[in-house]
Amino acid sequence: MAAITATARKASAPGVLTRPAARKLLALALVAAILVPLATARWASGSWPEALTVDASGPLAGASDWIIDNRDSHPLFLYFFGHVSNLVVVTVRAVYLALLAVGWAGVTALAGLVAWRVAGIRLALGTAVAFLACGLLGMWVPTMQTLALMVVAVTASVVVGALLGLAAGLSDRMDRVLRPVLDTMQVLPAFAYLLPVVLIFGIGVPAAVLATVVYAAPPMARLTALGLRGADKEVLEAVESLGTTARQRLLTARIPLARRELLLGLNQTIMMALSMAVIASVIGAGGLGDRVYQALASVDVGAALAAGIPIVLLAVVLDRVTGAAGANLGQAPRPRTHWLYVVVGAAVVAAAGRLTARLEWPDGWVVSLVEPVNRAVGWMTDHLYSGVPVIGGTADWAARFTTWVLDPIRDGLQWLPWWSVLLVVATLAWLIGTWRTALTAVLAMAAIGVLGVWNPSLDTLSQVLAAVAVTLVVGFATGIAAARSDRVDRLLRPVLDVFQTMPQFVYLIPVVALFGVGRAPAVAAAVVYALPAVVRITAQGLRQVDPAALESARSLGATSAQQLRQVQLPLARPALLLAVNQGVVLVLAVVIIGGMVGGGALGYDVVFGLAQGDLATGLVAGAAIVCLGLMLDRVTQPTERRAKKGA
Amino acid sequence: MRRRTTSAVAGAFALALLTGCGAADMTKQASPYANAQGARTVTLAVQSWVGSLANVAVARHLLEHELGYRVDIVQVDEVPAWDALSQGRVDAILEDWGHPEQEQLYVEEKKTIARGGDLGVTGHIGWFIPTYFAEQHPDLKSWKDLNKYADRFRTAESGGKGQLMDGSPAYLTHDKALVKNLELDFKVVFAGSEAALLTQIKQFAKEKKPFLTYWNTPHWLFEKVPMTEVMLPPYEEGCDADPAKVACAYPTAPLQKYLNADFARDGGEAADFLKKFAWSTEDQNAVSLMIADQKLSPEEAAEKWVDGHESTWKKWLS
């Protein structure tokens, strides 16, 4: 299947790209012909030349020391960061205490009733069941901690995002300034955000909340701007002709017209905040993420799963409810009294809980998953790890994958002269995008060299490339299968949902048990994590192919395979490119976390920086990750970018 | 326009009111989850290895059941834990493996952290091979014999060299320098976390494959996978002063407890109890093993141990 995809794309490429591509290649060849001899004459080395690096670790270590020394005395900290931090602590605490005061029955009832009001009875029942399941797994208190943190972080993200989006939506200049920044922020791995906030706020909830806000606000801002800009011109003109002021127009026409995008923004912000809230357990976010993290410390997959399931449930519930709220927008508004029922119902249940002194989740009502899961994992590792006849065990695969795939790619990349790497990056980025994206990509790559982490970055890059290749082969094949058969699609959907929302940490230990320590498990975890998005985008892209085109192909007597190869795949090319782009971004995020299972390279440096409080190492690696993410995104970015996940 | 200004002013005022107008020292903030039930709270730092989990579990059990405190546990790595301890976000670290730089800064200079005495357990870091391999090859005793066996320790990850496994980046290690300075034909592979390293070791042990790993005693793993130490050149005072030139073994350290200075002074019963808390390696291992291998929750393991060792912990409460 993969071969088909590849050839189909190649086959379609010349038709679209021939002439501009040739011109671009010619221009690049000219530039290279002038610059490369100069560069090699001056700095003849395979790896990035020493002379062109800047050692940032000295100043960074100095900055870090200064912050530690002045954190409790300097006015900047006392009068600004201190208040920010205080505000976060106070609000998270207030929400947390409120949730505890309402009690488990009250929270469940409130969530169910709100879901009923905005999304109907089925989702309401689902929501209530999800909350009860969190309690049943013995995770009620951590769930409430995560929820409290989420409420604060999402509120802040929505406010910040909406304000930025408003600015970008109303002013063209702001839009030009903000758009590239927001685009970039969306593709950066979550891990890269952790260090700077830790540097200022130290380990703890304030740092976790702020990292989450920085990570989750961009989609809100992008979609707000998109909604405001996309408003129907005729409606706006009509409103204007009524003699309204600019502010009235904004409040009565533009914002209401952008409601759908605003809700989509809210939905994405919530999802990103949740995934970050889990990763932020590395810097002291507490709650469910912390339980996962602690369970992994004692290699307890069962316990990690017991904390991972509530995260998935929360994610699915929040996603479906906000999604349904968006979908229901067009329908006639229900009577307002329903909100009254919600409040009264929740209050009654909460009061009942209070009176019967049943605020805390009863200890007896806990089902333990830990034993059976660990037994299953134990069986898997006992029987699959090695010595399987004919195909060999997973450990053998991992060893072969490392020796035959990862090592050659890494050594090849590191063997290439530095200027040729830049040239390849420039070529790829220019062929697929514009000269601007090419320039950004080359500059990002060069920045990695300047930071002095050229070799580890290429090591990380080799893991990304290998993982992306596997992801695309498997993802396209599965996506095609899902697009062609409704049954496969229905079977896959819940699986994809779960895999996509499961915190990345949960994958790490099973992959070690199956593939040992090293780069292979990091790649495996990345593939598992990136696969759902690739499958989903591929399937959607294929399904959205114009039915008329398919119909005419069928009437011409094309076989099913011909239809796929010659009609569906070429027409779905934008979606496939988007899938590649998303795949690369998601893979990078997990390959970095793979530093915790022996992936080494940049990921290890970040983990090392966090663990040793050695922020200089960590920040340099973090900056390199940012550059690598930027480069990879630009190299795979189709010229017209679509809203992420919005497809 | 007028109304906008007024509302902006009102907003700023409300913000100022909410946060308090004066200086805010964020180094003195507790966790927002602390004290939720209005009880007296102690916050303990726990590190990612199981021994640390065992200390904290038993201390927590006694603080909660005997002294009526509420205990919050924060997972932090070693060095950031010092930082958190100094800021008062954490009240105590129960097992520290020696961080002279931080000790100098926080205990001697800033006086924000106070020493809490010995934990009673002595820690040792070294290089280990599985005992089954050591018995087959009795001549493999010290670093000098390692190069002979380098090819036996080869893996896909280490390429043409032998593999020396290292664990969490949080741990003190000079292994890269050691391999270089002792001219060993080995490559250090960082597992990146203790969990990953443990999983890999258990996997190797199940197949009776040879491996060489950085490890530390006491550790419950020795009960499950017996390992024999490969001797490094003996440790001398100051031989590890320059991290790039280290060519000697790791020092042996009596593990220490540290308390936040304010907590040590005003912490009442809890602070007194934590200062007296000290137990033997066997006791710690017993609890660790229950947690990590029998998969008991730390609370259950602590309860089990506390039930059987009343004479030991009664002394900490007096």
Image: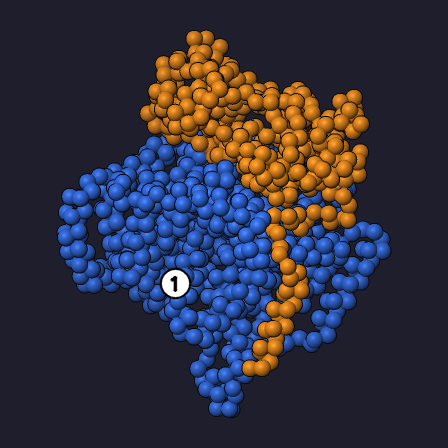
Q: Secondary structure at mark 1?
A: helix
Report whether A355 appears left or right of A41: right
Is A100 or A362 nearer to us in this picture? Answer: A100
Report whether A343 appears left or right of A150: right
Residue projecting furthest to the front: B109
Identified at 64% across, 44% down, the residue is B89
Residue projecting furthest to the right: A355
* Position of residue A518 measured from the top left corner of the image (x, y, whole percent): 42, 33
Residue projecting furthest to the bottom: A242
* Position of residue A400 measured from the top left corner of the image (x, y, whole percent): 36, 32
Residue A528 shows in this picture: no
The subunit letter for the residue under badge 1 reads A
Q: How many marks?
A: 1
Is B272 or A363 nearer to us in this picture? Answer: B272
- Chain shown in orange: B
Q: How is the image coloured?
A: by chain
Q: Amino acid at mark 1?
A: Pro
* Position of residue A254 measured from the top left corner of the image (x, y, whole percent): 51, 78
Report whether A358 appears left or right of A519: right
Residue B72 shows in this picture: yes
* Position of residue A222 measured from the top left corner of the image (x, y, whole percent): 46, 66
Identified at 26% across, 49% down, the residue is A422
For residue B315, which quarter of the picture? top right
Identified at 76% across, 55% down, the residue is A101
Q: Quick one: quadrant of the C terminus of chain A?
A: bottom left
Mark 1, Cα crowd under 10 Å, few <14 / some 14-19 / many 20+, is few
Q: Is residue B47 above or below residue B222?
A: below
What color is chain A drawn in?
Answer: blue
Identified at 76% across, 37% down, the residue is B268
For residue B224, which quarter of the picture? top right
Residue labelled with disc 1: A180
